[in-house]
Image: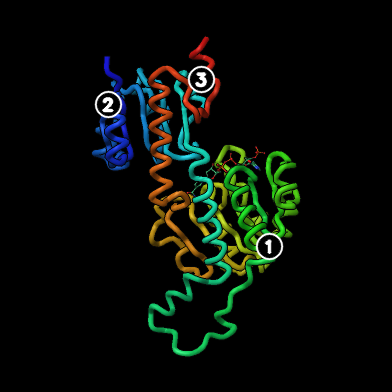
Amino acid sequence: MNKHVILYKKLSAPLMERLQAQAEVTLIEDPKTPDGLARLRDALPHADGLLGASLKLDAQLLDLAPRLKVVSSVSVGVDNYDIDYLTGRGILLSNTPDVLTETTADTGFALIMATARRVVELASMVRDGQWTQNIGPAHFGTDVHGKKLGIIGMGRIGEAVAQRGHFGFGMPVLYHSHSRKPAVEARFDAQYRSLDALLQEADFVCLTLPLTAETEGLIGAEQFALMRPETIFINIARGKVVDEQAMIEALKNRQIRAAGLDVFEREPLPADSALLQLDNVVATPHMGSATHETREAMARCAVDNLLSALAGERPKDLVNEKAWSSRQA
Ligand code: NAP
């Protein structure tokens, strides 16, 4: 019997052709609309594989898919999935690490530069015809080079941000992570800090860790209180790692200098969000990995993982190893 795959993200024509050569494909481009969700629910009973991103796939939904063998996420973050549930059912979950690391780190650095040098605010001033005289201290920014870069979550993306900061901008690197990273310390002359010490010391605090039960709300009022009026806060991880209301207060009260944010508690960020009223916020639309090259590489990687799983092979980027072992038993 032909394998049946549900795509909830559109693929490029070459990838679609590759997938269609090996499986029957149902494309649902709008799974977050009531109509799209209804079509997804109708298709799930026949699905052997799912491929997509940015959709919460909970147990209630996946209970409709008794044949499901693999969920191939076009993302590195896997916070949209109930991993215990998938593993319990022996469903493989794969993601797309590595291919997006450098691009996401570029986004992190874009936010560092944009916030420190007030690029968005000042460029808007020029565009609005408000540049009528030489700018003075009221419009000055702050230096990036030579400042202390604090990275929370020294994994693939954290390391790529550290590389940019250390080699490109001569920034002393501080980091906090689950475990010490001797290779990173040697390569970037990086120093390990407790979370509190890093928040107190770093000029730029950059979040690059996953959203998990442990990290949800990790940065709240208490943590913002440890930062300094010069601190610039960057989040390219996940919105829910931060208590957004506490961050808004810290920004309003100038407890911290500015924030560069690619991710939010609610996405898309509502147009009436208080964050958008603040001139010391640069907000981008969860665009960490959003370049043509990287999004195609991620999709290719997700298709490879899906096809491996459907062929009974271990996907290269398997998240839940236990599901694979249970299938082999
Ligand atoms: P990764 O290689 O797994 O790195 C994550 C790091 O976070 C690991 O080094 C881990 O430490 C550390 N960590 C985990 N929980 C922690 C905790 N409670 N306290 C301190 N450190 C903790 O993942 P990655 O590829 O760099 O991606 C990181 C995250 O970035 C993803 O999960 C995703 O949510 C986000 N992301 C966002 C975008 C975007 O568009 N903005 C794009 C890509 C990824 P150990 O190594 O010590 O375990």
Relative horizontal placement of residue 243, taking residue 174 as reference (left or right): left
Q: Earlier in the sequence, mark 1 or mark 2?
A: 2
Q: Which residue is mark 3?
A: 323
Image position of 90 with respect to 177: above or below: above
Disc 3 within 8 angstroms of ligand 1 (CB): no
Q: How many marks?
A: 3
Q: Which residue is mark 2?
A: 21
Label 2 Cα neighbours within 10 Å, binned few <14 / some 14-19 / many ≥20: few
Q: Are marks 3 and 2 in contact (CB under 8 Å)?
A: no
Q: Is residue 3 visible?
A: yes
Q: Which residue is mark 1?
A: 170
Relative horizontal placement of residue 64, taking residue 195 as reference (left or right): left
In the image, residue 313 lies at what x, y percent?
A: 45, 19
Look at the numbered disc 3 and give the secondary structure of its residue.
Answer: helix
Q: Earlier in the sequence, mark 3 or mark 1?
A: 1
Q: Is residue 45 visible?
A: no
Q: Earlier in the sequence, mark 3 or mark 2?
A: 2
Label 3 Cα neighbours within 10 Å, binned few <14 / some 14-19 / many ≥20: many
Q: Looking at numbered disc 3 in the image, what kind of residue is underneath it?
A: Ala
Image position of 129 with respect to 17: above or below: below
